[in-house]
Image (spheres, coloured by chain):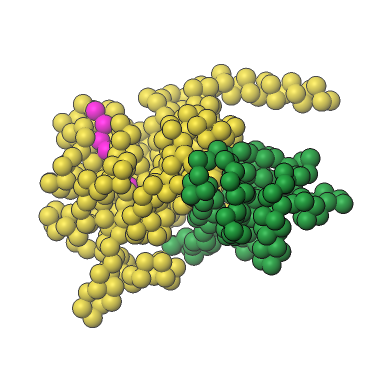
Amino acid sequence: MKMSIGLCLLLFSFLGHTRGLEKFWNNQLVSGCYVLDMKGKIVSNFPGKFCAFFDDGSFVSASDTHLRFFSKDNEVKWEIPGYFHHQLNLSIDGTKILALGSRTFPIKNNGMFRSDRIMVIDLAGKILHEVDSEQVLKETGVRWLTWETTPAFHEITGAGIEMSHFNSFYEIPINPNPAFKAGDFIVNGHSQGMFVISSDFKSYKQLPPLRIAYSHNTHDVQVNSRGNILVFVNRLTLGPSDNSFSTVNEYDQRTQKSVFEFSATPKELFYSEFCGGVQALDEQHLLISDQLAGTYVYSLKQKIILSAIRKTHKLNDTPNQVQQVKSVDLSKFLTSRNIKF
Amino acid sequence: MTSFLSFAMLLIVGCASVPRAPANAIIRHIPVDSSEQAKKVVENHVRYLRMLFEQSRDPYYGTPKWSEECLKANVVGARVDAGSSFSSTSTLLLDSKGTPGHCKGASHRVIMLFCSGAREVQEIKIPHPLPNGFTEKSFCI
């Protein structure tokens, strides 16, 4: 019996490898500050809500109160106070930190408002570039949001109204689309649109709206190597009385059309209203994470889900609302810290 | 808390002799050049654990990052000085690799110990509760 179970596991593992997953199987999954293996088992856990890791064992961590840089020995080398949110990324060369911070400010007779601060910071903690969403919206002529914050949000930030809700921030890679210059940044404002910020933070422009995303209910917007936009569209409906659903799209701004769309059949089975992530693992595979159900490796060529990892959404026996899950090779980071994986 | 303090004090009293750890204790020796560096190592350890278990709430759903049960099972102890020796004692759930940050796993006492004049800080992980017939005091004498 034991032998047959072993044989089954071996076969299963072999099947997994022949399905094209072997390239990613030694990577780790990162959900916030949790590091997991590709089966969803926790490898390690670090302080904060969003983390980015370095080969020498150091890491940067963002939380409700600070952005902190930890050495390999867990010493805080520097910290920047503030409410940091949604995601924490590195520049493509890994030498800069891309963070989304906050500012709260009073508006006469309207209480405290919150705006976003888009920040590029070097690894020594020096803020290289910083701009407030208020300025980005002003220069691009986009209206403020007037979103009432949740009680928890109000408690954390002190703000009653959000005037922007920026939720992703990436450097633009080398790509063939003249609209996207490598080294510039793309920032997504939920319900406000996508913005390109020049590498020196001196110019801001709003991109044309996505025809696929009514009201721009989107997350994790990035430019891929084909010069297209990868985007998680949170809420769509076929008609005013129909159920909502989500999609993941690769969108070509030049043609204003999707070149790829991931959705469920029936569509309502894939619905992640408030969060969601997408990552191009290579030219043929996407990593998709939704809000509540799991993380998936999707083959563009075979048009199937190769792997569904559910445990990323139930860490430490606590159901997690997951912003995004990403696949990263953290072998050097973990080895530097003597963490077995 | 009181037992933590007394444990720490007993450890420090025992610094003059070689601590006799249970067989199942895992000890990591962290070399230091000075008492000041040792203090920094222990302080970093305590601060890191506190930040690891810092409670926070999801801004949209209000759900806590850590359950109350989990925080009760992971208690981080402060540095306690006795003369120029010092230690910190925490109770933590560790995974099979001995790393903290979990809500299930084996409960351990994790002690950071520096004895006056030593050239190392010892990080001692002992399964908790201590083995039969073994008291915290016997560890220190």
Depth check: give the residue in front, A309 or A47: A47
**Residue A168 covered by magenta stretch:** yes
Q: Quadrant of the N terminus of chain A?
A: top right
Which image quarter holds the C terminus of chain A?
top right
Give the image location of residue B131, x and y in percent: 82, 49
Instruction: Give above or below for A57 relative to A150.
Output: above
**Residue B44 left/right relative to A241:** right
Q: Residue at x 52, y 61 (%)?
A: B55
Residue A8 seen in this snapshot: yes
Left or right: A276 with respect to B107?
A: left
- Nearest to the observer: residue A20 or residue B93: B93
Please check the rendered image and state whether residue B77 is part of the magenta-colored stretch, yes or no. Answer: no
Q: Is residue B137 left or right of residue A74?
A: right
Residue A96 placed where, x, y %? 29, 39
Q: Position of residue A190 (x, y in %)?
A: 31, 54
Q: Give residue A212's quadrant in the image.
A: top left
Q: Residue at x 33, y 54 (%)?
A: A80
Residue that sits furthest to the bottom in the current view: A109
Rendered yellow, the chain in question is: A
Magenta residues, as a range?
A167-174
Residue B3 drawn at (x, y percent): 71, 64
Residue at the image position 26 percent from the left and 47 percent from the top:
A126
- Chain letter for green, please: B
Displayed quadrant of residue A132: bottom left
Residue lying furthest right? B133
Q: Residue drawn 54% across and 54% down?
A: B46
Residue A294, relative to residue A255: is it above or below? below
